[in-house]
Image: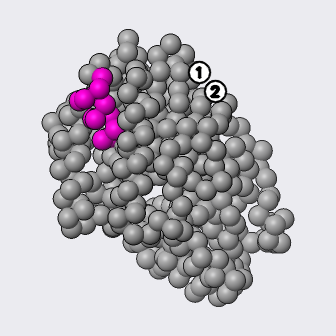
Amino acid sequence: MVKIANIVFNPFTNDSRVIKESISLSNAGYKVEVIAHGDKNLKEYEEQENFIVRRFAYLDRKVTKSKLSKLKIYLSYLKQSVNYCKNFDILHCNDLNTLPIGFIIKKFYNKNIKIVYDAHEYETEINGLKGINKTITKIAEKFLIKYADATICVSNAIADEYVKLYNIEKPALVLNTPAFQKIEKKDIFREVFSIKKEQTIFLYQGALSKGRGIEIVFETFKQMQDNRSVVVFMGYGELEELVKTTAKEYKNIYFHKAVSPDILLDYTSSTDFGLSIIEDSCLSYRYCLPNKMFEYAMADIPIIVSNLFEMKKVVEEYEIGVVLRENSSNGLGNAIKKAKSLDRIVLEENIQKVKEIYNWEEQEKNLLNVYNNLWG
């Protein structure tokens, strides 16, 4: 049986993409192990559905604050991962920070090993990357990508950029979409927060971090003169405390902690519209196709998105929501008014068409095609 190490530099708790890929590859007959880094209260070894998880290099985020200590943790994880993974058949390297593991093994231990580079973002153009760190990242990816036997990207625009940058065959496109589901609409948020039936619920779902339009959403809902529209933030990240504090101050803003992927869409379907107001702060965001867009659609709710290339294309082509004319509180306020006036029956019909196209079952075909070409 062909052995795959699906490598991530995170503790592997809610990584929905890696979970889906691991399950799909295991179902296709591969033996899959996810290699992650350790974290507090997580097991070093565990079994999940049809694959194994191993964690190396314990990382205590409360203690590990300095750049030097983070580097030590990374190097420890690198060393342990190389020693463990060198006898696998295929290394699936998620994000640029795991690609050095593939390079070291292929260069010094196992020249026959196959490497799949799965770029979850436009890796050299991510939000906040600048200066010497950006320069090093560009040099590293340009050097390391030569050792990948196959590359996967998460949007067509990013795949095109990789072709231009590195003169490689166009990477395979595997979008981060949810599995197809027929949704029975729930009403969880109205029950939890006592939101009235006549109030329209807007949902921000996903990472609570900078560059994702959270401040724009705040300003929009703070300025509303009534409570006919409310917003629920559900997720975790660096801005979580700010979201919690703001939710306590305003009656039309709510916070709910992140939930596990298996029940996520029950919560998503409990709203009326989904928000994806990503800012044009870097090329990775400009060309992104965030998974929450497809989660909203799979939960049968229309979408309001920022005016960025890939997101705009999907929303306008299939007529499943509203695109902001400008990324501002005024732009979002106008989009909300427009969204509330749309024909819900037409929206629902269009969303059903999108669900048939943008689901994991379709993306799984692309993933398995990469592996079939790689291993034959």
Instruction: Give amino acid for label 1.
Output: Asn
State the image quarter where residue 111 is shown.
top left
374 shown above or below 322: above
Residue at image location 27% in from the left, 35% down from the top: 103
Q: Quadrant of the C terminus?
A: top left
Residue at image location 57% in from the left, 79% down from the top: 242
Residue 190 shows in this picture: yes
Q: Secondary structure at mark 2?
A: loop
Q: Which residue is mark 1?
A: 27
Answer yes or no: do the residues labelled 1 and 2 have beta carbons within 8 Å? yes
**Which numbered disc covers residue 68?**
none
Between 282 and 333, the residue placed more toward the observer is 282
Specify whether residue 211 is painted magenta: no
Work out how far the residue at label 1 is from the one at label 2, CA to CA, in angstroms: 8 Å
Q: Which residues are magenta?
A: 99-110
Q: Which residue is mark 2?
A: 50
Instruction: Give amino acid for label 2.
Output: Asn
